[in-house]
Image (cartoon, rainbow, N blue to C red):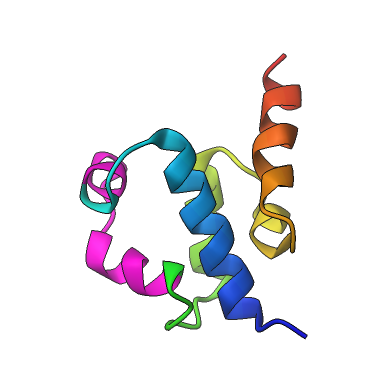
Amino acid sequence: MENVQDIIGRNLKYIRYQSKKSQEKFYGNLGLNSKYLASVERGEINVTVEFLSKLAKILNIDIRDFFDPDEKHIIEKKRIDEK
C-alpha cells in the first residue's frame, strides 16, 4: 500500500505541473513557501488536515482530491466542474 504522504505529494505535484510553472513561481504566486511545499511534493512532510483544507481552497480543489490515488482524476474533475 502506498504511503498517504506520497499520494498527497504526487497529487500536489501533478496540480503544479498542469500549471506549467516552476515551484517558486507557482507557490510564490499563491503566497506560499515553495521550499516547504517542495518537501510536501516529495512526501517528506506529514501535513495537517487544516493545512490541506487551506491549500485546497487556494487551489480551488476539493480536499479529497489530495487523497485520490490517481492524480489525473483531479484535473479531469476540475474541468468538468468548470463547465
In the image, residue 21 lies at what x, y percent? 31, 39
Residue pictured at 49% horizontal, 42% vertical: 59
In the image, residue 11 lies at what x, y percent? 58, 57
Q: Is residue 68 visible?
A: yes
Residue pictured at 74% horizontal, 35% vertical: 77
Report which quarter residue 42 is drawn in.
bottom left
Q: Quadrant of the C terminus?
A: top right
Q: Quadrant of the N terminus?
A: bottom right
Q: Is residue 54 visible?
A: no
Left or right of 16, for residue 28: left
Residue 72 included in the magenta stretch of the image:
no
Report which quarter residue 67 is drawn in.
bottom right
Residue 33 vs 21, above or below: the answer is: below
In the image, residue 76 lies at what x, y percent? 72, 34
Left or right of 33, for residue 70: right
Numbered-mark total: 0
Residue pictured at 76% horizontal, 24% vertical: 80
Residue 27 included in the magenta stretch of the image:
yes
Secondary structure mostly seen in magenta is: helix
Q: Tell me where the magenta segment starts and ends, as one range.
A: 25-40
Residue 24 vs 76, above or below: the answer is: below
Q: Which residue is situated farthest in the top direction here? A: 83
Residue pictured at 35% horizontal, 65% vertical: 37
Left or right of 80, for residue 15: left
